[in-house]
Image (cartoon, rainbow, N blue to C red):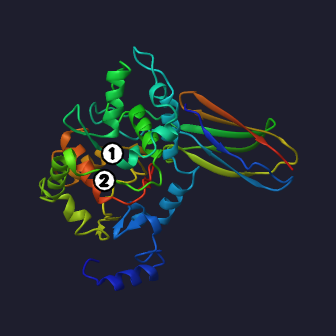
Amino acid sequence: MDKPRVKVPKKVKAGEPFEVKVLISHKMESGQRVDEATGQKIPRMIINRFEARLDGELVFSATLYPAVSANPYLAFHVVAEKSGELSFKWLDDSGDTATATAKVAVG
Amino acid sequence: MRMLPRPALVAGLLVAGIGWAVAGEWGAYEVDGRRSGYTYAAAETRAMQDDEFENAGLLWVEKGAELWSQADGAEGQSCQDCHGDATESMRGVGARYPVYAEERGKLINIEQRINQCRSERMQAEPWRWESEPLLALTTYVRHQSHGMAVSPVIDGPAAPFFEQGKTFYTTRRGQLDLACVHCHEMNSGNMLRAQRLSQGMSNGFPTYRLKWQGVGSLHRRIRGCNEDVRAEPYAPGSDEYVNVELYLAWRARGLPVETPAVRN
């Protein structure tokens, strides 16, 4: 999988929700299309799981299904009490993973 | 809808709660009545294009930036080795192309220039049309002119090719017997089934199209249009399409380069 894009505010306030945006390039092949040349079904190949952890603790996760478009974009809110590191993980049907990290600075 | 007088149509849309800005409210996206496809896009689509993060076309820009500095081919050279920093050396290229190329005796567009560099300077395999690396690097190069006014040169040696492009644009084709001009000039703003016909401006290409779920070239879009009127499309990169690309750039003159635009 390609390198994801991640956006976290530069500074956040303790105990206040802040928005995290993530975007990754992926074809999200639904498994419902047919290859016109061969008549064969194109096998499903989607990102089926996304997880965000703050210092190892799961703070957000999503299970994705074939109706999600290519290049999935997710935005969600996280609360942090102290500075730390957010780590993100995408997992697709082939078992391939992509990861990214971002610093969270509480101040 | 076509039979409604214009003010009634606008009023109807406003009543329906659909924002439809009146002429003159589009800022840089409208020049002397020439309107970017941006002004025909839904508010959500425009928001996606404007947001530096949400605009998925920027994924291609980032890939292009990587390719720019990656050595390839027998010469072991990258684009950067000759052209340096793309943010400086490529600025303006996307506003000017396609241009007349002396050595070819015809026009050349950005995709073709990239492949010419690859095969002649880098001794690398030229990239297949519409392949991911060619799209990414083209998008990256044209993105360097983001916000600059489209300003092609149509006189001098380019003039005959411009005329051929204009002829292409106004020639009826396909079983539906339609020319580009019938939809994009005589009927722009009207509905074509569920879609609003734009003026067919090329200033946002390569474009992230929601229908494609990815970035595609202008030639891919023209092929789609040709197929829609049930005509046999030309090959991407054909002289016919490069000539009409110049004519389209002239039609979009003064509009800002939006690459990568987001459209439905």
Whether residue B206 is visible: no
Instruction: Find numbered disc 2 in the image and state the secondary structure of the residue it sits on.
Output: helix
Vertical placement of B200 versus B117: above or below? below
The residue lying toward the viewer, choosing from A44 and A82, is: A82
Q: Which residue lies furthest to the front in this view?
A: B156
Q: Position of residue B214 (x, y in %)?
A: 43, 44
Do the residues bearing badges 2 and 1 touch, measured as CB atoms within 8 Å?
yes
Q: Which amino acid does label 2 sit on?
A: Ala
Q: Quadrant of residue B41?
A: bottom left
Vertical placement of B195 versus A38: above or below? below
User: Which tag, 2 or 1, sits closer to the chain's start?
Assistant: 1
Residue located beneath label 1 in the image: B97
Residue located beneath label 2 in the image: B249
Q: Where is residue B159 in the image (x, y as percent from the top left)?
A: 19, 50
- Dot 1 crowding, Cα within 10 Å, few <14, some 14–19, many 20+: many
**Chain of the residue under the numbered disc 1 shown in the image:** B
